Amino acid sequence: MLKKLPVGVDGFKKIITEDFYYVDKTMFIEELLQNWGEVNLFTRPRRFGKTLIMDMLKNFFEIGSDRNLFDGLKISQKKSYAKCIWDSIR
């Protein structure tokens, strides 16, 4: 079965659960954790996924989020990050 293109879809959870194509940008989380600052500015041209990245970050860091959304994505291979973050916010 062919995956759907997420045209106009900016919800990370919806893209993952409803089997849309997704370019894995979860390693951006590792970059943020390594190069953290008090304030981070995310600049991209229009339609380059700023809202989707923010929603992905929300799902990763928010208490009570479904951790299974990240199964099979690159950040899930970095067990030290996922375990450390998710265990500390329980």
Image (tube, rainbow, N blue to C red):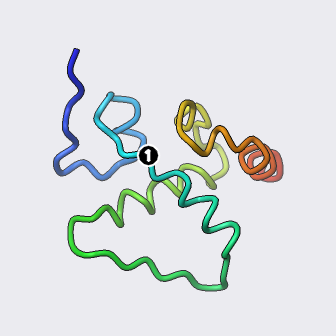
Q: Nearer the viewer, residue 39 or 79?
A: 79
The residue sitting at the top extreme is: 1
The vertical placement of 19 against 61, above or below, is above
Q: Say which residue appears at 70% left-offset and 69% top-offset.
A: 34
Question: Quadrant location of the N terminus?
Answer: top left
The vertical placement of 42 against 49, above or below, is below
Q: Nearer the viewer, residue 5 or 65?
A: 5
Q: Secondary structure at mark 1?
A: loop
Q: Is residue 13 left or right of residue 38?
A: left
Instruction: Find residue 64 and report its horizontal and vertical position in percent.
Output: 64, 43
Instruction: Find residue 90 and report its horizontal and vertical position in percent.
Output: 79, 46
Q: Say which residue appears at 61% left-offset and 65% top-offset.
A: 31
Q: How many numbered dots are placed on residues in this image?
A: 1
Instruction: Count neighbours of disc 1 (C-alpha within 10 A) and say few if under 14, some if 14 to 19, many if 20 or more.
Output: few
The vertical placement of 74 against 40, above or below, is above
Snapshot quadrant of residue 13: top left
Instruction: Find residue 59 and report its horizontal and vertical position in percent.
Output: 54, 49
Instruction: Find residue 66 and report its horizontal and vertical position in percent.
Output: 58, 37
Q: Say which residue appears at 40% left-offset and 35% top-offset.
A: 16
Residue at numbered disc 1: 24
Q: Say which residue appears at 62% left-offset and 53% top-offset.
A: 62
Which residue type carries mark 1? Asp
